[in-house]
Amino acid sequence: MANKLFYGDNLQVLKDSIDDESIDLIYLDPPFNSKANYNILFRSPSGKRSTAQIEAFEDTWHWNEHAALAFDEVMRCGNQNVANILRAMFSFLGENDMMAYLSMMAIRLVHLHRVLKPTGSLYLHCDPTASAYLKVLMDAVFGGDRYLNEIIWRRTGSHNPRRSLGPVHDVIHAYTKSSAYKFNVIRRPYMKGHVESRYTQMPDGRMKFTSGGNVLTGAGPTEDGASGKPWRGFDPTAKNRHWAIPGAYEEFMSDEYQNLNAIEKLEALYQAGLVEIVEGNAWPIMVRYLDERDGTPLTDLWTFQPYTQGTAWGDPTHGIDEDVKWLGPTDPERLGYPTQKPVGLIERILRTGSKEGDVVLDPFCGCGTTIHASQKLDRQWIGIDITHLAISLIERRLKDSFPTVTFEVEGTPKDLEGARDLAKRDPYQFQWWAISLINAIPAGGKKKKGADRGIDGYLNFRDADGKPQIGIVSVKGGDNVGVTMIRDLKGVVGRDKACVGVFLSLVDPTRDMKKEAASAGFYETGGMKFPKIQILTVEELFDGRTVHIPFGFTEGFKKAARETKEKQGSLL
């Protein structure tokens, strides 16, 4: 299967493009009902955070026609449990923002359940605002007995509210499609104090476990004859116990070991030096040395603990849960996307619930962290997002981090007819898409306040002396273009003291437009000349033509670091 990015409404993509029972693991981080508008922050040409902000998505849900249609679709979806739960929520909440959020999520959860394999699992990331409601919805979709875990993730360092405890965590609800789900036990290193108190260093340097009690028997007698029989002078039945040999021994023994009864296993382990009898001890004891694979299985609390570096055995560098540490404002991993999650967080989920080659789906893929983690861990992946801005960011991120990566992008225009269709359906998305073709930065979001000042985007570049400069981009998606638009662009370029202006159009420019652009003259730097006003059509961009700018571009999005197989991080 080819890795794919889909631009579009994830509900429609799920219906049209994702097959039943084709996905191994789903992670979704839908916009929370937190009544906040998030913006993407871009870099300026100097590399500093820019004041220009683009509305990536509006994180507010309102009861409207779309919410009502989603509610009605749930009523007709065929899952009566989900319909009954959503109807009960409606009777309690009424037509409000929370109900809109839940209706839109409910129908998507129904389809996510449909595309999940019987061995698959789903991890839904949310905040406490809607966590309880979503839990009830997911119980209805998956069944309450398919609830795997509630994972608590510490998403920030601290808050200082005056009338409540500091809200520093998110919730991740984990569900499975069936009882035959995939699950890998992930361990983190023992704490140094644990090893020092329970292990003794032997002359050969190995750490031997020396503080264990009776770990070879279990409480109560048993009907199984072998597990209750005496062995080498030890009689478990006499002490109301039975032999209970840890399954961990199997990895050290031959395949035939599994077919032995309890007494035969004890003898085989004794002969192999893995069980020893010490005079005076009430029971035989298992011989165990500290192995690099040993450690504490992950719990459902994923909370980075600052200043704990060096407290784990064998790792003097990392702190507890440092692989899932929240992203600070200056974190090298941060790309500028407001709700970006750390790659390590998604890696934990993928390592726990999937294996190499499995297919991972993120229907709200945002800046592409799930896609990044999947590519890094050799999973196949599908990402869906409803903004071209997000799709453009993910494409850049993947190419920066994995230079040889291959993937398909569905739903974005592939030819002039597709571009015309997008411009007709959604002019703002067309603007963002067209601007992304020349690596420019969009100048404003879908809900600009006031006039846009004739600017749809910015080009960042450097002149011959290395100084940062800007270009102005104007995008026209209509069929009617004229010379006055070029005059307007010339005026904006002069007003903002920009070096160049770029006019992107769906249709061919007129002769007067070309003449007016030529009259603007040239921008000169380092002995080179560049047209002050440049006109490009979408068709020309498809043919490989691009803007004529000195010394390349300074990317608007922060460049993602290149990944290497060695860069796996520490699980603490």
Image (spheres, helix red, strand yellow):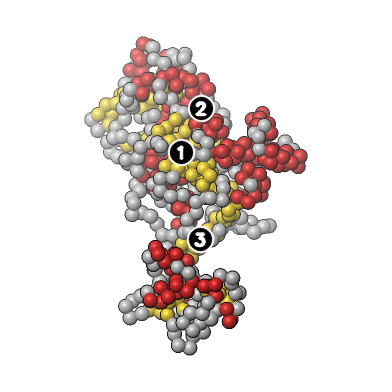
Residue at left 58%, top 82%? 238
Q: Three-letter amino acid code at disc 1? A: Ile
Q: Nearer the viewer, mark 2 or mark 3?
A: 3
In contact (CB < 8 Å): disc 2 and disc 3 = no
Residue at left 46%, top 19%? 420
Q: Is residue 250 above or below residue 217?
A: above
Q: Three-letter amino acid code at disc 3? A: Leu
Q: Is residue 496 above or below residue 178?
A: above
Q: Would residue 459 be visible to someone looking at this image?
A: no
Q: Is residue 360 above or below residue 76?
A: below
Q: Which mark is residue 398?
A: none
Q: Nearer the viewer, mark 2 or mark 1?
A: 1
Q: Which mark is residue 298?
A: 3
**Nearest to the observer: residue 464 or residue 566:** 566
**What residue is pinned by disc 2?**
428
Q: Three-letter amino acid code at disc 2? A: Tyr
Assess disc 2: are there few (<14), some (14-19) or many (≥20) residues with their C-alpha within 10 Å of its C-alpha.
many
Residue at left 44%, top 71%? 265
Residue 207's x, y, as percent? 39, 75
Image-based side of 23 in relation to 62, left or right: left
Mark 3–mark 1 Cα distance, whole angstroms, equals: 27 Å
**What residue is pinned by disc 1?**
382
Mark 2–mark 3 Cα distance, whole angstroms, equals: 45 Å
Residue 4's x, y, as percent? 43, 35
**Nearest to the observer: residue 253 or residue 306:** 253
**Nearest to the observer: residue 126 or residue 26:** 26
Assess disc 3: are there few (<14), some (14-19) or many (≥20) residues with their C-alpha within 10 Å of its C-alpha.
some
